[in-house]
Image (cartoon, grey):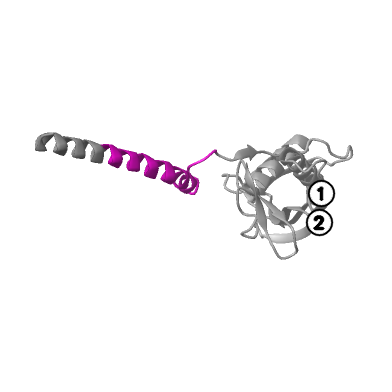
């Protein structure tokens, strides 16, 4: 065998061994690369978005009010001023459901639903967000204090707690004429995301029914028919 032939075989074998090592290294790194990619913002499947619904049923004796009302965006603590759906497993912790989110920040969503619920009554001249160019007779100032699913019995379906305080302010002198606290608890029918969101819907609907009713009756009592 000539020197050139031996050299050729040596370099060929070395090239093959090198390619084999590269393939092994690539296979070993693949799971790690996959794991890292799941941590990159924007990677992976987007969360499922959920919406809640306005209240459409109210007491038959709800008074008609010839007034204009502005509804502020509710104030809220940082842990629920988010699109994430909150849960608790103890009085001192807050967590969030994975792969699920509200379609908007919770306070903004509640503001929209309150306005739509007032409109559904057909008992008020005009209602809008506080950002609207509207000469309001009253401003409703909400405060979203609780908006969470509470796990109290292991993996049993949680109980949703909604707590919303409202203050009714008379314009233009900005006098607070009253406040009311709406609170509701609703246990989910099943420990599934759909079941939990439905419990949120029921609890918030009960709270909105109370507060819309209280607001219209308070406005009527304060001002009387125009």
Q: Is residue 152 left or right of residue 130?
A: right
Q: Is residue 160 above or below residue 56?
A: below
Decide: few, some or many residues near mark 1? Use Cα within 10 Å; few <14, some 14-19, many ≥20. few
Could you tell me which quadrant the N terminus lies in?
top left
Q: Nearer the viewer, residue 128 or 220?
A: 128
Using the rendered view, name the quadrant where residue 177 is placed. Answer: bottom right
Give coordinates of residue 112: x percent, y percent.
66, 42
Give coordinates of residue 55: x percent, y percent.
77, 38
* Span of residues in magenta: 16-45
Residue wearing tag 2: 152
Question: Is 143 a magenta residue?
Answer: no
Question: Is 41 a magenta residue?
Answer: yes
Q: Is residue 105 above or below residue 123?
A: below
Which SS does the magenta portion mostly show? helix
Spatial distance from mark 2 to mark 1, Cα to Cα? 8 Å
Q: Is residue 20 left or right of residue 55?
A: left
Going by the picture, which residue comes out furthest to the left?
3
Identified at 10% across, 38% down, the residue is 3
Residue wearing tag 1: 156
């Amino acid at each position: 065998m000539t020197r050139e032939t031996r050299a050729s075989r040596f370099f060929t074998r070395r090239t093959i061994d090198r390619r084999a090592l590269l393939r092994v290294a690539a296979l070993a790194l693949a799971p790690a690369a996959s794991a890292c990619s799941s941590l990159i913002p924007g990677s992976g499947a987007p969360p499922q978005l959920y919406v809640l619904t306005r209240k459409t049923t109210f007491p038959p004796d709800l008074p008609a009010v010839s007034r204009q009302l502005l509804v502020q965006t509710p104030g809220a603590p940082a842990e629920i001023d988010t699109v994430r759906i909150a849960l608790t497993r103890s009085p001192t912790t807050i967590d969030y459901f994975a792969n699920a989110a509200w379609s908007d920040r919770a306070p903004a969503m509640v503001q929209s639903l309150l306005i739509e619920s007032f409109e559904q009554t057909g008992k008020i001249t005009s209602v809008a967000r506080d950002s609207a160019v509207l000469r309001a007779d009253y401003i409703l100032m909400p405060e979203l204090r609780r908006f969470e699913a509470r796990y109290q019995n292991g993996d049993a379906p949680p109980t949703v707690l909604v707590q919303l305080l409202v203050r009714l302010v008379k314009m233009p002198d900005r006098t607070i004429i009253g406040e009311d606290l709406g609170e509701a608890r609703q246990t989910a029918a099943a420990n599934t995301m759909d079941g939990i969101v439905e419990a949120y819907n029921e609890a918030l609907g009960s709270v909105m029914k109370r507060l819309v009713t209280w607001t219209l009756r308070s406005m009527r009592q304060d001002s009387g028919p125009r």
